Image: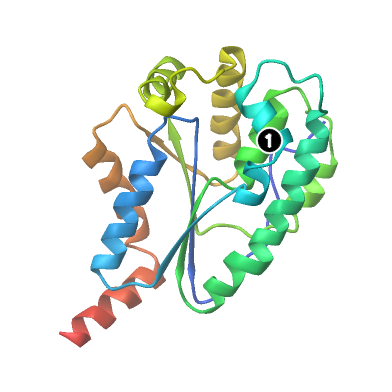
Amino acid sequence: MHKDKLHLQPHKTKGLFITFCGLDGCGKTTMIQRLTSYLQEKQCPVLCTKQPTPFLRESEIFRTFMDQEDHSAFDYRCLSLMAAGDRIQHVNKVILPELRAGKCVISDRYLYSWIANLRARGYVRDRWTDEIASYMIQPDFAFFIDVPVQTAVARVRSRTAERDRYIDMELQYKLRRQYCRIARKNRGIILSSLESEDTVFSQILEQIERHRWMRAANLRKEEGK
């Protein structure tokens, strides 16, 4: 049986690493955009990135599992192994160099989404996932935006490009449970997007403004006036 606690590595850099996870339609894109704008207004160096990377997202196997009901042509464990490699490459060659340069890196999804999808699909005895996690770095803030499944799906369906996209409803309920479980066991911060957009964003700022990186950024800005 899998372990609930993931043993990620501290990144030990002068940067700030923030991740956002949750169901499609939870509102994380809005929060990432608002946080990025907030940091840029403070003249903070920031990089927004995404997992999995476009390399994997545009692959046939990924699009099959995301957009089609019939998955018989591919094995989900195969996709997960590809996603694991994509994430390790992304951490080591994109995220860590930017953190070492002192930037704030904001990632739209992270390892937690990968784990949640595996467990929601029934792969709860795959111990190799714990070993993969040990090669990933611990975010300074791991935000999980929680939302009822029906609300999330309605938001996705409101997007013209995704109005007819296949959505496995049973999977969405399982995913929501897994996200909440992973967050509680791994120092994640659960935010409800049933709150107003401004309230959720204020909760995010309340967390990160206490971090040493933000205090230093605010001090530099004051000294630059």
Q: Amino acid at mark 1?
A: Phe
Q: Is disc 1 placed on a helix, strand or loop?
A: helix
Can residue 217 be spotted in the picture? Answer: yes
User: Where is the C terminus found, in terms of image quarters?
Assistant: bottom left
Nearer-the-camera pick, 99 or 158 = 158
Q: For mark 1, does the 10 Å Cα neighbourhood hold few (<14), some (14 to 19), or many (20 or more) residues?
A: many
Residue 22 percent location from the top left of the image? 50, 35
Judge left or right: residue 131 versus residue 200.
right
**Residue at the spot of label 1:** 62
Give the farthest residue toward the left.
225
Judge left or right: residue 217 versus residue 91.
left
Nearer-the-camera pick, 201 or 4 = 201
Nearer-the-camera pick, 56 or 36 = 56
User: Where is the N terminus found, in terms of image quarters?
Assistant: top right
Q: Relative to 156, say whether 200 is above or below.
A: below
Which residue is pictured at 62% across the width and 18% down the height?
171
Can residue 11 be spotted in the picture? Answer: no
Judge left or right: residue 77 versus residue 103.
right
